[in-house]
Image (cartoon, rainbow, N blue to C red):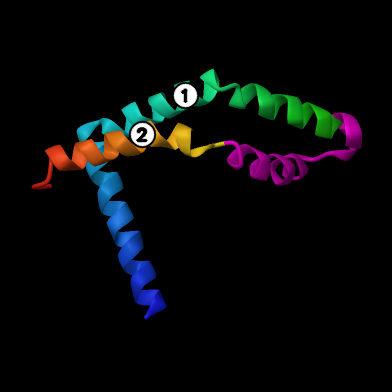
């Protein structure tokens, strides 16, 4: 039963993504999200964090995989609901306007 639900969810996400791509809305949402994250200093926070990781471990002792493992959780954590709010509203509005899709 869980597997069926997961497959249905994946199918729905794929269909939504396809409709957003076809309408050009996905690219607009990506631009909006990037701008919102930049305004909030997210990129600068991550840059400072990875520089600190390199400084602590030493340039010779850190790999790209190490950086990804260190940065990914920190990069996801500060994406607050306030950042997600406007893109989610735009997605809801898009589908309300295109209910027949």
Q: Nearer the viewer, residue 92 or 30?
A: 92
Secondary structure of residue under mark 2: helix
Query: Residue at position x 35%, y 71% from top?
Result: 5
Q: Residue furthest front?
A: 82
Q: Quadrant of the N terminus?
A: bottom left
Q: Is residue 58 visible?
A: no
Q: Are marks 1 and 2 in contact (CB under 8 Å)?
A: yes
- Give the magenta range: 55-78
Residue of label 1: 36
Query: Residue at position x 47%, y 32% from top?
Result: 83
| Magenta stretch contains residue 48 | no
Residue 71's label in the rendered image is none
Q: Earlier in the sequence, mark 1 or mark 2?
A: 1
Where 68 sits versus 3, above or below? above
Neighbor class of circle 2 (other Cα within 10 Å; few <14, some 14-19, many 20+) is some
Residue of label 2: 87
Is residue 15 left or right of 36 when viewed as pictured?
A: left
| Magenta stretch contains residue 70 | yes
Q: Residue furthest left?
A: 100
């Amino acid at each position: 039963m869980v597997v069926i639900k997961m497959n249905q969810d994946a199918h729905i996400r794929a269909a939504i993504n396809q409709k957003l791509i076809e309408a050009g809305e996905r690219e607009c949402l990506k631009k909006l999200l990037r701008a919102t994250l930049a305004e909030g200093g997210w990129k600068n926070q991550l840059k400072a964090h990875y520089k600190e990781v390199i400084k602590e471990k030493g340039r010779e002792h850190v790999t790209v995989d190490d950086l990804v493992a260190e940065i990914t959780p920190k990069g996801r954590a500060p994406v607050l609901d306030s950042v997600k709010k406007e893109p989610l509203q735009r997605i809801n509005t898009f589908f309300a306007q295109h209910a027949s899709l």
